[in-house]
Each structure stands twice: as C-alpha cells, then as structure tokens.
Amino acid sequence: MLRRFGASVCSSLQAGRHSTFLNFSRAFAAQVKTFEEAKEKLGTLSEEPGPDIKLRVYGLFKQATVGTCNAKKPGMMDIVGKAKWNAWNDLGSISKEDAQKQYVDLVNELLKADSGAESSSAGTHHDGDSGKYKETLYREEGKITYITLNRPQKFNSLTPTGYIELTDALESAAKNKTVATVITGAGKYFSSGNDLSNVAKAGIDKAAIKDIAEKSAVMLEKFVSAFIDHPKLLVGLVHGPCIGIAFTTMALYDVVYASDQATFHAPFTSLGLTPEGTSSYSFPKVMGPAKANEVLLLGKKLSAAEALECGFVTEVFPADTFEVETKRRLELLPKLAPISLKESKILIRSLDQAKLHKVNDLECKRLIGMWQGDECLSAAAKFLSRK
C-alpha cells in the first residue's frame, strides 16, 4: 500500500512538473511570437523615431536576441558605433525575456503615439493648413499668418527639411497681404532645437562630416536671414521649452508671449558649440552683457519669469489662460495701421540690420569648424546614446 501511495505521489509530482513545463513553454512561445510581431509592426510607423528612441530600440533588440553586451567598445570617433554600444551596454544584465517585453512595450507606445500624431495632423490640416509642408503648418487667417512647428513626437526639433520649410514659410509670409506673422509649436514644446540625426548619418566619415557641416552652415545662414529681414510684425507664442536655434532667433522677434511653463535654454558650451542665430550680438543687447554671458557661456536655463525680467519676452501668462490671453492680443493686430506698422519696424531694425547679417555670417563660419571638432562629436555621441 505504501508503495502504491509513493508511486502515486511520484506520478503526481512528475505530472505537475510536466504541466508547469508545458505552461512555461507556451508562455515563452507566446512572448517570442509577440516579440516577432513587434519587429514587424515597427516598420509600419509613418515616421522614423528620433535618434534616442532608435538607440533604445536597438539596445533592447540586441539584449533580447544576444543577451548581455559582449561587443568591444568602439573608438571615440565612431560616433554611431559608440552610441549603439552604450545603448546596449547600459541595459546591464537584464534577461532576454525582460528585454523582449520592454521592446514590445516600447514599440506599442510608438505605434500609439504615431496613430495620435496622424489624427492630430489630419485635424489641423482641415482647420486651414495649406498642406504645403511636411514638418510645418502654414495658414493665412484674415490679416495674420500662422506658422506652426509640427513635429510634436520629436519635440519640434528642426531637421534640414524643417529649416528649409520654415525659411520658405517666413519668405511667403513676407510677401502676402497680412500684417503680422505668428510662430508657435505643436505639442508640449515650442522647439527642442536642432535635430542631431545628421550626425548619426555622417558616422565616422570625416569627409561626410565636413560636407554636412558646410551645407548646414549655408542653410543656417539663410534660415536666420529670413528672421533678420522679415518685414512684418513677428510674434512668438512660447508655451513650453524653447531650446537652441529656436531660442537664439527669438531675439529677432518683435513680440514674444510666454506661458509660465516656458523655459529658454542655449546649451552651447555643453555641446561643444558656439552661439548662433545672431545671439552673440542680440543677447547682450537685449538682456545685458552679464545675463547674456550667463546664458551663452554658462548654459543658464531661463524660466519665463526670468526671461520677462531681463526684457527677453513681452508678457507671461499662466499656462491655463495662455491661449485665451494671447488670442485676445492677436485680435488687436489687424486693427493697427499696416503702413505705419511696417515703416516703424523698418526704422527700429534699420540701424542693426547690416550688423545682424555680419554677425550671422561670422557665427555660421565659426560653426563649420565647431561641428567637426572633437568636443561637438563627443557631445553628440553622448546625446545619441541617452536612453
């Protein structure tokens, strides 16, 4: 009887282990299938993710398929290789299963955001967007031209396409019959500044980096010139973070309204760069030398209140009333005498216009060398490797 009982117990244990194994196998197979499906779905995104997200995807994929990073660390000048290695190595010893799950979750988040962005873009187009641009919305409403930076998923960072489109939009607005041009950003940011994807495309090819640097300088000079020469009243609506070139060119606007959630940042010395957008001249003139040095040399990030205090912005409103308050002020612009408005701006800008173009030229030439320097390339690699 004891033998029969023992045999029964052993049989039950074996059956239990077999059942557990089958359940685990099924669960693992289901996870692998979900992982494979996520790989396929990633290719259906309407727009490629930004460099930081792409590196996160790469790191998780390597961890999910290979395991803990076992590759040799690339050299400092291999910007892309080093960024990829960091993205993988930073995952440490998490299991393949956990990496697969995180990979699937990340892809699902991207798909959800992509779907929302498409719906948002479609809705905005029906509200009057000309449909002329890919990364910028442009519409003429009454006597005002509205230009919106429209890459909310990438925090309205500017790609070469974005630079060209915004330049063209400003030139178009300069020629139409409106009296004012209003610029704002879609989503939570006004703009996060320059998109660093170009650095990733250049890789370690010094000739490619040099070529991109020279072409970027030409593009940047034309872009900034469009702000310098814009003949209409130029108004900025800054509801969130305003970084880099979006911040530096803001000194060329005539009126800037900011939400109390807005911040202003030009992190040049932490990125191995020098000032742009005429800020080496316009910031000391607007803010005073001491504050300009703090912003441009020490990388001080200004709050909306600080920007108002130093004369950089016109008015600051609470975030929850920002849209209402700015709309109220914009409604007053068509009532202004258009010729008087235009001629007054010409007088205000006339003494500085030639100087601003000279500064723009000098800044762009200086940046050609800075973009190719070790400090900038190392900073770009570090930025691209962030999770």
Image (tube, rainbow, N blue to C red):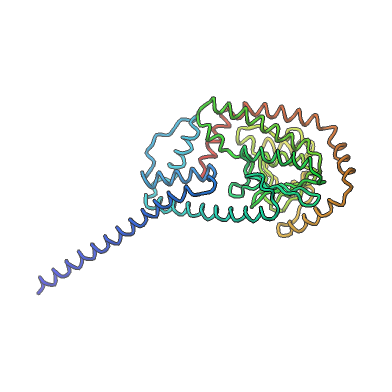
Q: Residue at x 53, y 42 (%)?
A: 51
**Residue 145 seen from this side:** yes
Q: Indicate left or right for 51 with 7 as reference.
A: right
Please state the total of marks drawn on the protein image: 0
Q: Nearer the viewer, residue 112 or 118?
A: 118
Q: Indicate left or right for 259 with 386 as reference.
A: right
Q: Residue furthest bottom?
A: 1
Residue 20 position, x and y percent, is: 27, 62
Residue 228 position, x and y percent, is: 77, 36
Q: Indicate left or right for 97 with 284 as reference.
A: left
Q: Residue at x 73, y 46 (%)?
A: 183
Q: Nearer the viewer, residue 298 or 17?
A: 17
Q: Indicate left or right for 256 with 219 as reference.
A: right
Residue 310 position, x and y percent, is: 78, 44
Asked if 259 appears above or below 165 in the picture, the reply is below
Q: Residue at x 69, y 34 (%)?
A: 276
Q: Nearer the viewer, residue 229 or 382?
A: 229
**Residue 299 seen from this side:** no
Residue 17 position, x and y percent, is: 23, 62
Asked if 289 appears above or below 44 in the picture, the reply is above
Q: Quadrant of the N terminus?
A: bottom left
